[in-house]
Amino acid sequence: MNKQPSKESLKDKVHIWFGISSTPSKQTESKPSEFIITLDILKELHPDCGLSNRIRVANHVSDLAKAKKFEEHAVEAVWKAVEDMLTPEQPPEARHAVLLLLRAVIQGQGERLGPLRAFFFKVIRDYQPSNEDLSDRLEVFKALTENGKDITYLEEDIAGFVLLWMDIGLTADFLHVLVNLVKFNSCYLDQNVSVMVQKICLLCNRTTASTDIEMALQVLDAVVCYNCLPSDSLTVFIITLCRTVNVKEFCESCWKLMRKVLGTHLGHSAIYTMCRIMEERAYMEDSPLLRGAVFFVGMNTPTLVLPSFYKAMWCANEMVSYEIVLSITRLIKKYGKELQVVTWDILLGIIERLLQQIQSIGSAELKSIVFELLTTVEELYEQNGFHGSSDKFFSLVEKCADKRPDASVLTLISYRAQSIQPAKDGWIQNLHRLMEKFFRNESRGVIRIKVLHILSFVLSTNRQLYEEELIEVVVVPQLSGIAEDRDLAVRRQATQLLVDLAESCSTHHFTSLLDIIQRVRDTHTTSSPPGGRDTHTTSPASWRVGETHTPLHQPPGGRRDTHTTSPASWR
């Protein structure tokens, strides 16, 4: 007895808030107000009243359904009066009016519908023709399921309806509903998820509408997150992501989704699938697909998939090769010092193929990042962090030495110089080849001078036993034309080397050395070389003792021969 006044007091307050009379009748106190569908309304919905009048009344009832609760069985009575307006022979405006009425009834009458929910669901499912009025029917379905969240009374038929609708109306609007269906009712879709995934992937691969792709990715994300991605759908799923990641605006979404897949029980299978894509010749011409596969595995476990990278390069494609370079560059920068010989063998094989490809593809961007990759490996080598075959690596650098920066070529020459010693087979021939490539056929002065330093060092350390052979095989053939060399710094260095060598020469080659020095003097005391670059008119002897140059290397023991006369006096 004490609670009733307080309840009425609260009700009074609510009435005041909403502007409702605070003295309700006894009928409204006992039962919420219901709207009665009178016989007059039903008569006006009858076919005899004319189509335009029926549409007008249907729209009026729609407004009532949203605002008021109908009396019991009123919904059934209204439906019976208008159901003929949904037949195929009726004009579109009639069908539209009935579908709007259904939507309003479902939204307004709510839980009162009960099993009628299943009946109305079948109305839109079995609609004929099935591909007509899709937008209006979808709105009814959205109202019926609260955008896919509530499928009460529809559990048994929802999976079949989803497949049916995907065949006739796979739009972004429906995909939005499908996201909720997967999130809230995935257990009722399990048997058909595989087909759903395939249809969504097909849409992703064919459409150019960004909205459709965005919603399709959201559905796939929901499928993965709610652990219902079937293993038999993995391949088409992976292929779709590999293609779609090439679209800039979806790159991040695809990357996040792939990471989720790799974190599931299907992770290893996903990596295997992408490796298979890169290796199978059936996909060799599909550059977007290959590029996507390279990107995903390169961002996760590149060391394990390097053989697949190598096979993916059988068909030269700029996009694929570019992605491979990015992946292995990340790998080397992050784990370079930890990589072992076997891994480096594969990496060097990939770099070799890349160097071949930049010759045929002719892409400036690809060439640039390939050369940056070589520089990254060189830096690792200089830090003693390179554990691969140095000989193989520098052979690759030598193949493109004419396009490498000076510092790179100097590192290459220093490495090659290590094998120019009597303990190595063919060391004199190696010296000759080094001089041929990086002195005679090279135009950069700093590189040519570096080679002259190496030649000078070899001569000073091996003169006693190999002087004659070195002069005959290397010095004379390589320096005989130094008098015509246009590079003043190189000519001075070479002439100084000849002077130093002639001072201590005790073989018949002394005359050959002297002839070369004489030609240098004669050429540059009578005239300057073309272009007027050289204005030096003194003899080689003065170059040696002048302040412009110091001897390249001292002989063993740090002492030089102490002849009392200069080459000039010998002449």
Image (spheres, rainbow, N blue to C red):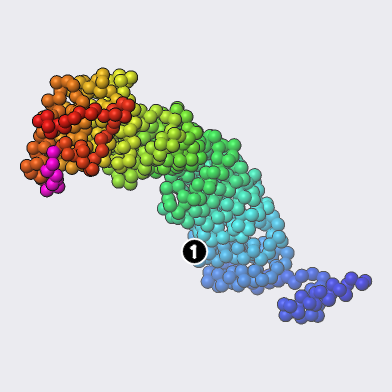
Q: Position of residue 50 (x, y in %)?
A: 54, 70
As drawn, the residue found furthest toward the right would be 1
Q: Is residue 533 magenta?
A: yes
Q: Residue at x 50, y 55 (%)?
A: 172
Which residue is more in the foreground, 452 or 102?
452
As drawn, the residue found furthest toward the front would be 564
Count of numbered tags: 1
**In the image, residue 284 above or below residue 462:** below
Which residue is more in the foreground, 462 or 361?
462
Q: Which residue is drawn at 41% across and 36% down?
A: 382
Q: Say whether residue 36 is visible.
A: no
**In the image, residue 165 above or below residue 270:** below
Q: Residue at x 30, y 20 (%)?
A: 422
**In the image, residue 88 above or below residue 480:** below
Q: Position of residue 205 (x, y in %)?
A: 43, 46
Q: What element carries label 1?
A: helix
Circle 1: residue type: Pro
Q: Position of 119 compared to 538: left or right? A: right
Q: Position of 456 compared to 231: left or right? A: left
Q: Give the range drawn in magenta.
A: 532-539
Q: Where is residue 320 in the image (x, y as percent from the top left)?
A: 38, 41
Q: Where is residue 369 in the image (x, y as percent from the top left)?
A: 36, 44
The residue identified by callout 1 is 92
Q: Say whether residue 405 is visible.
A: yes
Splitting the image into 4 quarters, where does residue 283 fall? top left
Which residue is more in the foreground, 8 or 479?
479
How crowded is the residue under tag 1: few (<14 C-alpha within 10 Å), some, or many (20+)?
few
Splitting the image into 4 quarters, where does residue 345 fall? top left
